[in-house]
């Protein structure tokens, strides 16, 4: 199936932090792919901006290298890189200084959409917003894209929201959570609200529980210092897992429009019960096969931050009361795998007798790898010998269903950046949503700090600490296997 590409209006996109890791690995290759697909009109421009001095040609060379290293697309025609590079410019700017801003202003073409991507440390967001305003670039055609982390608690998130609000209206602020740009995550909404099949069953009467797993095999890599200041709760749960939970749990919005969707997500966050200490397990990976443990990796022998967290979460509303949500995420686990599993209840009575066993339907939404969904259904085991039942998956792998080699499944950043240009905020977090998520997260973290809780150790390559298994066993349930 060939996807329809609708070109967006010509735009100017300024990437602050254009020389940084995120720009090189994600933003610039994503823009290149959109250019290849024909979505960017020829006169759209991308302007890198950073503190270090580079000529336009040097920056173009940097972009070419980033594309060579990180672009995964194989469908671009010969000569496309050169054509793309012609769209690229560079301005030398210090977010905290005054130089370079007039050069940037002079580059802007009046009347067209301008987006400013803040791919720099959060401590610079306020400086950038202020100087964009001061130099006449915070007008009605402007949008800003803000990367995570959005604050480290409720107070800092409120401060950041207030700073940005001094110069930009909420409708101009795009707080990015790349999980929301994943095709599967959007498909979650399509499946829920585009089919008659699921929505009537999507409640505590039919759903036993829901599991959300985001498992990584890597450790903290070169981000040790940053990660240790956050831990998995701030780095993953407050944003990514919370967003997934919202999309699974929210009521159907009246329309698929930004505020209707975000209003419903906000209601979910506000309906979350506080989490009791008994319902949380924190872990730190240990040493194995000569590889260092977590405290060594982050160069903080006394670290109490978690590289793994599992929680049992209750949503106190009419739809979900009595159906727990189990969330877990961690580093150095046995496989790289992110999925949401909606585990339905067993049938109330088995007409096939006890020997047929107990069976249940599970709808699994795979975020990575191999984006797709499958639904476990119970069928008769083929052959003679009575009515034996087995569970088999109805598999829908998007790459198989939508394109011969997965080329039609765009990367999350591609989708999200094009949404910024189109002015569609549906897949971006609103300020009040982020604050509500921190308001729920803060007491959990404060509780650990007040009690002096320490994470338990787990084996690298495992499914996390044994205590996390107990979190579900205690309720007579078990986690799904983490496998890629
Ligand atoms: P990075 O590799 O350290 O890059 C930082 C960028 O900011 C560089 O281009 C740097 O340019 C520029 N910069 C630093 N100080 C500046 C100043 N005073 N004025 C103008 N530019 C300045 O960081 P990153 O990993 O790309 O991360 C950028 C943002 O994205 C951070 O908020 C991070 O939390 C977030 N994020 C990153 C990732 C990721 O995978 N990397 C994932 C999610 C979110 P010069 O060196 O030329 O000054």
Image (cartoon, rainbow, N blue to C red):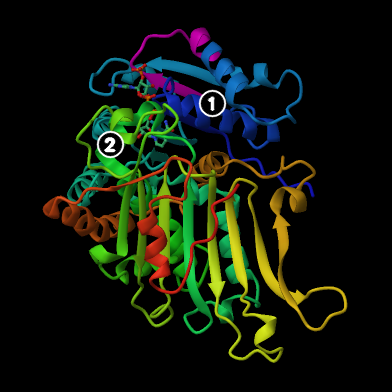
Compared to residue 360, the image places residue 416 above or below, namely above
Tell me where residue 467 appears, x and y as whole percent.
35, 58
| Numbered mark located on residue 45 in the image | 1
The residue carrying pointer 1 sits among few (fewer than 14), some (14 to 19) or many (20 or more) residues within 10 Å by Cα, namely many
- Observer able to see residue 158: yes
Query: On the rendering, which quadrant does ligand 1 occupy?
Result: top left
- Observer able to see residue 121: no
Q: Secondary structure at mark 1?
A: strand
CA gap, disc 2 and disc 1: 37 Å
Disc 2 C-beta below 8 A from ligand 1:
no
Q: Secondary structure at mark 2?
A: helix
Residue 328 found in image quarter: bottom left
Q: N-terminal of the two: label 2 or label 1? A: 1
- Residue at 36% x, 38% y is 286
Tell me where residue 189 appears, x and y as whole percent.
56, 64
Of 433 and 239, nearer the camera is 239
Which range of residues does the magenta coloring cover?
Answer: 46-60
């Amino acid at each position: 199936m060939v996807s329809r590409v609708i070109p967006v209006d010509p735009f100017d996109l300024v990437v602050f932090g254009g020389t940084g890791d995120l720009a090189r690995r994600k933003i610039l290759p994503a823009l290149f792919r959109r250019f290849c697909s024909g979505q960017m009109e020829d006169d759209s421009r991308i302007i890198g901006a950073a503190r270090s001095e580079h000529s336009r040609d040097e920056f173009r060379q940097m972009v070419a290298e980033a594309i060579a290293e990180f672009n995964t697309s194989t469908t671009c025609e010969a000569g496309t890189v050169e054509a793309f590079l012609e769209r690229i410019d560079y301005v030398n700017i210090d977010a905290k200084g005054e130089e370079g801003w007039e050069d940037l202003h002079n580059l802007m073409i009046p009347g067209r959409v301008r987006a400013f991507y803040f791919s720099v440390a959060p401590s610079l967001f306020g400086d950038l917003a202020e100087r964009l305003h001061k130099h006449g670039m915070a007008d009605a055609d402007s949008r800003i894209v803000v990367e995570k982390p959005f604050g480290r608690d409720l107070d800092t998130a409120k401060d950041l929201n207030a700073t940005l609000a001094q110069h930009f209206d909420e409708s101009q602020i795009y707080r990015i959570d790349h999980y929301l740009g994943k095709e599967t995550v959007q498909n979650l909404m399509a499946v829920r609200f585009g089919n008659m099949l699921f929505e009537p069953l999507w409640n505590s009467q039919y759903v036993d529980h829901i599991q959300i797993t985001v498992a990584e095999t890597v450790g903290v890599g070169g981000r040790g210092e940053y990660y240790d200041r956050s831990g998995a709760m701030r780095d993953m749960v407050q944003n990514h897992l919370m967003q997934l939970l919202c999309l699974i749990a929210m009521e159907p919005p009246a329309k698929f429009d930004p505020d209707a969707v975000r209003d419903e997500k906000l209601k979910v966050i506000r309906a979350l019960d506080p989490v009791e200490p008994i319902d949380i397990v924190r872990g730190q990976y240990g040493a194995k096969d000569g590889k260092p443990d977590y405290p060594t990796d982050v160069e903080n022998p006394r670290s109490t931050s978690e590289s793994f967290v599992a929680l049992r979460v209750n949503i106190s509303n009419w739809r979900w009361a009595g159906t727990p949500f189990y969330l877990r995420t961690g580093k150095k686990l046995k496989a790289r795998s992110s999925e949401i599993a909606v585990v339905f209840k067993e049938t109330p009575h088995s007409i096939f007798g006890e020997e047929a066993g107990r069976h249940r339907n599970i709808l699994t939404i795979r975020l990575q790898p191999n984006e797709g969904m499958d639904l476990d259904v119970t069928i008769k085991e083929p052959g003679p010998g009575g009515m034996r039942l087995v569970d088999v998956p109805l598999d829908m792998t998007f790459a198989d269903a939508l394109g011969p080699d997965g080329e039609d499944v765009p990367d999350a950043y591609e989708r999200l950046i094009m949404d910024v240009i189109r002015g569609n905020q549906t897949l971006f977090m609103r300020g009040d949503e982020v604050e509500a998520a921190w308001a729920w997260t803060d007491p959990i973290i404060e509780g650990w700090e007040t009690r002096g809780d320490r994470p338990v150790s787990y084996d690298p390559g495992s499914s996390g600490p044994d205590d996390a298994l107990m979190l579900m066993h205690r309720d007579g349930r078990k986690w799904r296997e983490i496998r890629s």
